[in-house]
Image (cartoon, helix red, strand yellow):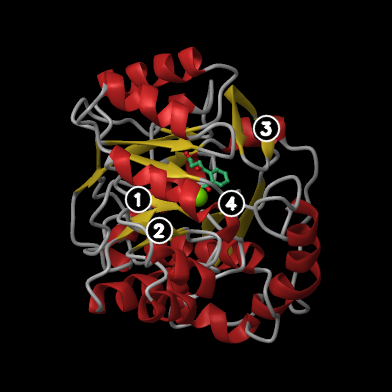
């Protein structure tokens, strides 16, 4: 799916996304899941081809044919597989989607959500010029988004934040470094404190918790971890060591809704707010992010924004729309409340595989 506008982070620029979807055929109901792995192993070691191979060879065969009490029971069937959380999430979330449809319940309720409207922010990539970035921020502020997050990296940080703050002194602003700095940059990162940021997301190594704690002690600004948090135990360790004061929950990164709920719960117990991260999802993953964001401790605006910011045409109907207050209203219909446009998906499909159990 071609992106409406390129998206650039400290690890590279993309102009389109190749999206892996999973359909689970469950007793007459189809559940859909989206694998958020990218086309290359840059945000995480997982990428589309590892997810494809892992699903077809290990995950799908492990779950096909079982009668489960709930989608949450999926984890037990696939726990023998280490890692591959994005692949696992695509399968597990398809089952949650199916369960919600079977029970004729909104997915957000099945997940334990409590709110009917969620707060939205935007994530804006690195641009060709600061002027181009300011123009983008202008558009999003005017649209009503409640928080602006910009991507930063060495050479695209202090001077950029300075220009943003000069123009919007009070806008809720954060930045995301996607691991572009090291501890040698502590003095430089301390300069970020002058911009009254809501948080700095993942400044250091993608697999680190300990050194973020060391950094957090030297900064006023709250750190938020994204890449480093793979499961609830990581979140607990990060909070206990003081590595962050906020946690970004991405359902794909942590392996599915069951673990995402656990991350949410350990953070809630320790009064650490969470927010829902995004991976430039199509409408299917986007609808799942919306459902997850209704849980109580999603207290900060997420990277969950309108379909039209990414796609000319999304694969769900209606598309995700954001109110002029920067919120998304939650549907009470069974499932996600968004219909899957299977005809359109079929047209864009380049590869498809049907995996059957022995008995069917
Ligand atoms: O670090 O949050 C991130 C997109 C791809 C990979 C990593 C990240 C992102 C985003 C975009 O920030 C969030 C979105 O708008 O979907
Ligand atoms: Mg991030």
Q: Residue 278's spot in the image, x, y percent?
A: 47, 47
- Would you say residue 85 is visible in this rendering? yes
Of circles 1 and 3, which is in front? 1
Estimate the spatial distance between the alpha carbons at disc 2 and disc 4, rounded to whole Å.
14 Å
Cα separation between marks 3 and 4: 18 Å
Residue 206, image quadrant: bottom right
From the image, tell me which residue sits under label 1: 199
Residue tagged 3:
13
Give the CA distance from mark 1 to mark 3: 23 Å
- Residue drawn at x 35%, y 49% is 290
Tag of residue 262: none
Q: Earlier in the sequence, mark 4 or mark 1?
A: 4
- 3 or 4: tag closer to the N-terminus: 3
Q: Quadrant of the N terminus?
A: top right
**Circle 1 crowding by C-alpha within 10 Å: few under 14, some 14–19, many from 20:** many
Location of mark 4 (residue): 181
Q: Is residue 217 above or below residue 16?
A: below
Taking the image as shown, residue 277 lies to the left or right of residue 80, namely left
Q: Secondary structure at mark 4?
A: loop
N-term mark: 1 or 3 = 3
Mark 4 to mark 1 CA distance (whole Å):
15 Å
Q: Determine the residue positioned at 39% across, 73% down.
A: 263
Give the position of the C terminus as an image quadrant: bottom right
For label 2, the residue is 224
Q: Is mark 3 within 8 Å of ligand 1?
A: no
Element at label 2:
strand
Q: Is mark 4 within 8 Å of ligand 2?
A: no
């Amino acid at each position: 799916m071609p992106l409406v506008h390129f998206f650039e982070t400290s690890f590279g620029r993309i102009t389109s996304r190749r999206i892996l979807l999973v359909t689970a055929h469950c007793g007459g109901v189809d559940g859909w899941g989206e694998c958020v792995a990218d086309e290359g192993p840059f945000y995480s070691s997982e990428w589309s081809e590892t997810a494809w191979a892992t699903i077809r060879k290990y995950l799908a065969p492990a779950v096909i044919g079982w009668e489960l009490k709930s989608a949450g029971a999926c984890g037990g069937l696939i726990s023998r597989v280490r890692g591959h959380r994005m692949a696992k999430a695509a399968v597990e979330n398809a089952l949650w989607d199916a369960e919600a449809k079977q029970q004729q319940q909104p997915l957000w309720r099945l997940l334990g959500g409590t709110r009917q409207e969620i707060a939205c922010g935007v994530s804006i990539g690195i641009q060709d010029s600061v002027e181009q970035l300011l123009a983008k921020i202008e558009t999003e502020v005017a649209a009503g988004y409640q928080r602006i997050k910009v991507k930063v990296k060495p050479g695209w940080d202090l001077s950029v934040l300075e220009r943003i703050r000069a123009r919007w002194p009070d806008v809720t602003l954060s930045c995301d470094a996607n691991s572009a700095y090291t501890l040698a940059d502590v003095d430089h990162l301390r300069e970020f404190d002058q911009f009254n940021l809501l948080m700095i997301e993942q400044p250091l190594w993608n697999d680190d918790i300990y050194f973020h704690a060391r950094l957090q002690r030297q900064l006023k600004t709250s750190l938020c971890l994204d890449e480093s948090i793979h499961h609830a135990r990581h979140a607990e360790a990060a909070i206990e060591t003081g590595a962050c004061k906020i946690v970004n929950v991405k359902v794909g990164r942590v392996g599915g809704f069951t673990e995402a709920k656990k991350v949410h719960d350990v953070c809630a117990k320790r009064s650490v707010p969470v927010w829902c991260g995004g991976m430039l999802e199509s409408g299917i993953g986007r609808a799942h992010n919306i459902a997850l964001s209704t849980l109580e401790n999603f207290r900060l605006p997420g990277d969950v924004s309108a379909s039209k910011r990414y796609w000319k045409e999304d694969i769900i109907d209606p598309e995700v729309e954001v109110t002029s207050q920067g919120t998304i209203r939650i549907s009470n219909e069974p499932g996600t409340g968004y219909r899957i446009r299977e005809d359109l998906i079929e047209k864009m499909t380049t590869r498809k595989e049907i995996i059957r159990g022995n008995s069917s």
